[in-house]
Amino acid sequence: MSDNAISSNSPKRGVGAQAILLAGATGIAQLITALIFVIAARSTDPAQFGTVVAAMALGTSFVGFVDFGTNGYWVRELARKKLNVEEFGQRLTTKVLVAGIISILLGGASYVIAPESNYWMAAPVGFALFVNQSAQVPLRGMARTELISFSVLLDRTIAFGILVLLIAIGFDAYSSLWMCLTVGSLSAAVLGWRLTPAAMRPVLKLNLRANPWRGAGFYGLSTAAVSAQTLDLPLLALSGGPLAAGLYGAVNRWTQPLGLLVTAFASASAPFVARSGSWGEAWLHVRKALWVPLAAIVGCIVVAAFAPLAVRFLLGNAYEDSATVLRILALAMVPVIVNQPLAGFLQSMGHDKGVSVIIMISVVAQLASVFVLGMLLGAVGAAIGFAILQLAIMVSLLIFTRWAARHRLTRP
């Protein structure tokens, strides 16, 4: 790739502008997602709904485990211009092929062994999300995350349209979740690919010697640990029963618009931070967009305050116990808003090893607490476990950042 090509594909907007566009798109998309799950929840009882949302959570976990940090690592290396388009294309092809084979094997086995569990739904949902996130890598590496906002909106808009269509022709809303989410993610992947300038669009070429995971080890450990968080629903269903999983799963996605608001900030900032030589230089890029995480914190407080009213209005009296769950999750999102960009900045500066250790230990503690507290307190216990995890990560990352600054650590 020539220097001219790189120059022509340089960022068109700063962190603030990109964060505004992506935050707006993700906010709208997650409101649509919340509506999709509300429609599905209202069409069935909490116990039956619990098996479906547990399957969706497994699909999300699949993405993190198979990707194993490659997307984040590739974004950093593309931003630093250390990964060329040809090698990127070969790695991407191999990774998608492996993911496809794994999803077919796991989905088929689940359908044959326990079709009533609905866990087979995780395979198509997970693979489609996997392809979608991989297709966004070139745009993220170019610091063109504002373009990703179009595919984000298309994803959930199509998903909602497919859900409405399936309901209209006689399908149950809760059993249609996997179909609408799968089609939405694949549609967004196609658009993301088309939005990528030709000079940065990798040619899909199979090379079995191109190891997709080479160099992404510590990124992978962090990503796998974060993905393991979504196992809280299956663990809760195991320890607290399907009713607890249904009460928790009915509202745990309601905080995602707040979480993905700060994801937009972290995603838009990452390539700028990766190109910086020090924390001071990186700060010049991100400080003008700090209003995004601050706005998300205000949103957390509002959601916590109106949790009972929102649950009663949207879900009905059958989900009354979900109000306490939602309130705890909303307040627990405050440390998430600190953790996500801080961890991303540390990784972008090359400190992915320290971040991976912190996150892995914290997630193991969270999953253990979800299982134990879910057995004792049901859905509320799972929410408390999530809050414990985020507080532990926040304290640990702040200590690590302080230590790194005191020892004048920049890029390793």
Image (cartoon, rainbow, N blue to C red):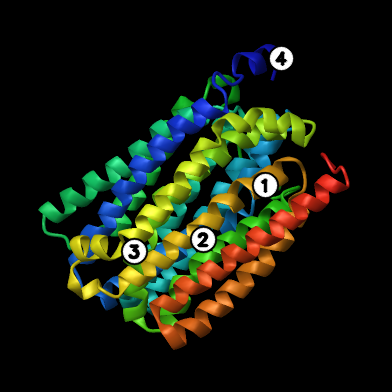
Residue that numbered label 1 is attached to: 212
Q: In the figure, is residue 289 to the left or right of 42?
A: right
Image label count: 4
The amino acid type of the residue labelled 2 equals Phe
Helix, strand or loop at label 3? It is: loop
Q: CA distance from mark 1 to mark 3?
A: 36 Å
Residue that numbered label 3 is attached to: 251
The dot on residue 62 is 2
| Horizontal and vertical percent position of residue 366 | 57, 72
Asked if the residue under mark 1 is in contact with the one under mark 2, i.e. CB atoms within 8 Å, the reply is no
Judging depth in this view, the residue of 129 and 261 nearest the camera is 261
Q: Which of the two discs, 1 and 3, sits closer to the camera?
A: 3
Residue drawn at x 46%, y 46% is: 296
Q: CA distance from mark 2 to mark 1?
A: 16 Å
Residue that numbered label 4 is attached to: 3
Residue drawn at x 16%, y 60% is: 171
